[in-house]
Structure formats: structure tokens, C-alpha cells
Image: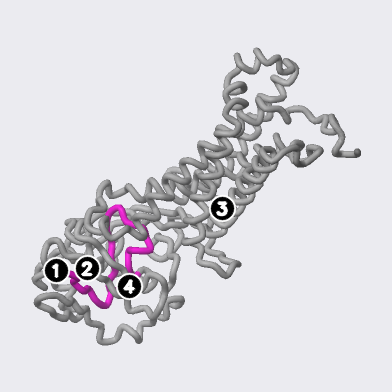
Amino acid sequence: MGPLREGAFRGRLHDARTAVSVGRLAGAALVVCFVTGLVSHYLQQPPGWAVNVLPSRPVWGYRLTQGLHVASGIAAIPLVLAKLWTVYPRLFAWPPLKSVTHALERLSIAVLVAVTLLQLATGLLNTVQWYPWPWNFRQTHWALAWVLVGALLLHIAVKAPVIAAHWGRRSAGTLRLPAADGPDRRAFLATVGAAVGAVTVTTAGQSFTPLKDLDVLAPRHPDHGPQHLPVNRTAAAAGITAGHLTGYRLTVRGPHPYDLTLPQLQALPRHSAVLPIACVEGWSKNAHWSGVRIRDLLDRAGAPHSATIRVVSLQKGGAYSVMEMGASYARDPLTLLALSLNGAPLDLDHGFPARIIAPNRPGVLQTKWVGMLEVIV
């Protein structure tokens, strides 16, 4: 009866051909987002066996993968919404459950839709660092990603005959879909493509700096911040003030432990590198860093070449106030205890007096306000 009767939905383009056309684009975006998310997760929290073998090259690796992760996630939003629009009449099919098999299929679709919308919504909120929920975002995001992929694979397996039948124009013609729908379908797909292009172009500039002048919807602009570099966690948020740094000393613990005052640290041989700072929220930018090589500090402490190091920040608390760095990073000649940024001493918000900068590493692991390096044999 009413909206549940057969043929009640008379709108065009709610057919399998349109659903498949949009669905394959949405699926591609979700797969890219998932794969790049795996890279991000394992670089942030590597398993024990991988700590000393994660690659520090290419130096722009994490910048690329995390930029793609956020960009593909944002692009997936209009694609998923368009996909849901093409199939929503089926949600009102009557009777709602025709058999046990049909019930299981609808349950799997409900899980897929719910998890996808939740994953995309919470991921988008993470880019603006707003967490209006009580759970840990990163752990939940990781778990939901596997549920999403599992539900997506199950959906593809169940719908494989329909997908195959409507994949190309020839197959659609064979099934005698209304020819009059062709122009409308192309217009609809063009509109969806324009929406995806618009959200991508107006947000990707936070990482792909040639588009930075069009970066109007992203929460970060790569040039906005102290020393023309964005800041996620300020010194005030970390509880760091200039007074806390009075009498600063860097402690290096190892077989031959030692301390360095700031003047002593500044007097050590300097090295420079152009490296990106790339944050999990999707923004990144190259900068010119100068400081002391971590491997030189470790050699002075008599650290073995295979040693992992623990980096401790002066900030009190916080998920990343203590960070571990494997030998592949610690021994890389480009990994610095940076003392200056873009030719000037570090701003307090950028980690003055000293911070870590390493190639191919998430920004949350580029520890600021470093107070101690500890060798872990």
C-alpha cells in the first residue's frame, strides 16, 4: 500500500546500470582509502617485528599516502550518497523479508551502509580534530575499516551477477534498459563527478600545495601558522611555556650517557634537510630544517647501530609525549633533532628548543619539545 506498492517509485535512474556505474567509483575510492589507511596505521603503530625495518624513504612517502587517504575519503562522501540515492527505493521493498537468504542479504547491506557512513563521518570530523564521542578515534577507525571492507566484499560477492551484467554499455544494451535514460544517466554521472571534483579541488590543497590557493574547504592551509607552517598542538595546549624551558638540558641515555645545555647543543655540527611535515589529518608541507643528526647524538652515547630509541617530550601527558623510533629512522642521515625552521630558530609552537624531524614519518611522531633521547637495546 502507499509508498510500498509495486512501481510507487517512478523516478528514473534508480536502476542497476546507474547503481553499478556509481558503485564502482565509490568502491574504488573506499579501497584507496582503506589501503592508504593501512599504511598510516602501521607507520604510527608498527608491530614489534617491523619497528627497525620500516623504510625512511621515499622522504615524501607518508605525505603522499596520507594525502590520498584523506582526499579519497572526502571524495567517497558524494559518491556514497549518490550510490544510496540510486538504490534507496529498494529499501522500501515489500515484503521487507522474503526468505532467510534475503534477510541475511539485507542485514549485510544495513551493516555496510551504517559502517560506511559512520566511518566517513568520523574521519571527516577527525580532519578538524573534533571528537564528540567517548571512544578512542584511531582504534575505532581501524576496527571499523576492517568491518567496512568485509561488508563491501560480501556485498560485491552477492551482487556479482548484477554487477557483471550492468558493467558496460554493451551489457546494459543487451538487457534492454530504456534508451531514453541514457542522456539523463550521463548528466547524473557528470553531476556526481563535478561534486567529487569540487570537494577534492577545494580540500586537496592542504597537502597538494599547487592547489593551495583553492584550499577553501579544508581545515588547514599549508601556509598558515608560525613560520608559515601549520600547527596542530600548540605549546599552550601541551602546557609548555618559556618558563618551563629555563635551564633546558637535553639528556641522552645510553651506554655512555650525557647531558647537553642548549648552547652546547647549538654548538654541535649542523646539518640541513628539506623534509615534509605530514599530519594524519591530511595536511602537509615541505620545510627547510636545520639541526643535529640523531645518529651523531647516538654515536656519542655509544648506541649500537641496531638500537631503537625512545624520545621523550617535555610536555606533560598526551598520546604522543613519548615516541619510539626504529633504527631505520634513527640512523637515517636526514633524521634531525631540529633547532631551526626555514632559517630561523624554532617557534615555541613548533617545538622550541628542539624537535624531531624524520623522512617518511607521520607528524604525530615528529616529537616536539624534546627533553630526552633514550637508547633501547
Determine the secondary structure under disc 3: helix
**Nearer-N-terminus badge (4/2):** 2
Q: Tell me if label 3 and label 2 are in contact, CB under 8 Å.
A: no
227 shown above or below 156:
below
Where residue 309 is drawn, which disc sits there? 2
- Residue range highlighted in magenta: 351-377
Give neighbour class at mark 2: few <14, some 14-19, many 20+ (Cα, 10 Å): many
**Nearer-N-terminus badge (4/3):** 3
Q: Marks 1 and 4, Cα distance to the nearest angstrom?
A: 18 Å
Q: Quadrant of the C terminus?
A: bottom left
Q: Residue furthest front?
A: 100
Q: Tell me if label 4 and label 3 are in contact, CB under 8 Å.
A: no
Q: Tell me if label 1 and label 2 are in contact, CB under 8 Å.
A: yes
- Residue at the image position 54 percent from the left and 37 percent from the top: 27
Q: Amino acid at mark 4?
A: Val
- What residue is disc 1 on? 298
Question: Taking 271 as reference, is 129 left or right?
Answer: right
**Foreground label between 4 and 3:** 3
- Residue at the image position 58 percent from the left and 40 percent from the top: 198
Give neighbour class at mark 4: few <14, some 14-19, many 20+ (Cα, 10 Å): some
Q: Quadrant of the N terminus?
A: top right
Q: Marks 4 and 2, Cα distance to the nearest angstrom?
A: 11 Å
Residue 309 in view, yes or no? yes
- What residue is disc 3 on? 119
Q: Amino acid at mark 1?
A: Leu
**Nearer-N-terminus badge (3/1):** 3
Determine the secondary structure under disc 2: strand
Q: Amino acid at mark 3?
A: Gln
- What residue is disc 4 on? 322
